[in-house]
Image (cartoon, rainbow, N blue to C red):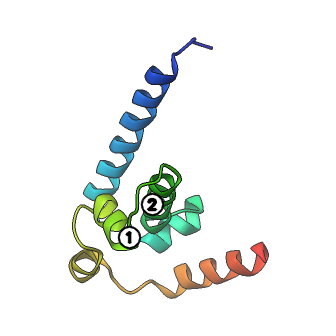
Amino acid sequence: MTDLSDAERTALEAAAFRRLRDHLRERTDVQNIDLMNLAGFCRNCLSNWYREAAEAQGIAMTKDTSREIVYGMPYDEWREKYQREASADAQAAFTAKAKSDS
């Protein structure tokens, strides 16, 4: 494994996060339920993790702020522009996964 300084590792992790964030912003066709069903996380999860990381560093952040950072716009605006009704299959898969996780 490559020896990295803490600063190098942090910079690379930040760059990877920004690339993921930007990719998800571009892929508005991919719905959160699709992400949850396939990967077990979605844009909302990512925004929650971001907010939790900020709070761990003593930075107060609202859910709305962290969602805007991830979505690139206010969440309600993103939902209005891009969110569509989940298919019956996607809803069933999500429900089945939730039941198996509990």
Q: Are marks 2 and 1 in contact (CB under 8 Å)?
A: yes
Q: Classify 58 as above or below 36.
A: above
Q: Which mark is residue 88?
A: none
| Residue 37 percent coordinates (x, y) | 57, 68
| Residue 77, quarter of the rendered image | bottom left
Residue denoted by label 2: 51
* Residue at image coords 38%, 87%: 85
| Residue 19, quarter of the rendered image | top left
Number of other residues with Cα within 10 Å of mark 1, as a class: few under 14, some 14 to 19, many 20 or more: some
Q: Earlier in the sequence, mark 2 or mark 1?
A: 2
Q: Is residue 27 left or right of residue 11?
A: left
* Residue at image coords 76%, 73%: 101
Residue denoted by label 1: 62
Q: Classify 83 as above or below 73.
A: below
**What residue type is disc 2 on?**
Arg
Q: Is residue 17 left or right of residue 90?
A: left
Quick one: SS at disc 1? loop
| Residue 24 percent coordinates (x, y) | 34, 56
* Residue at image coords 49%, 74%: 33
Q: Nearer the viewer, residue 85 or 48?
A: 48
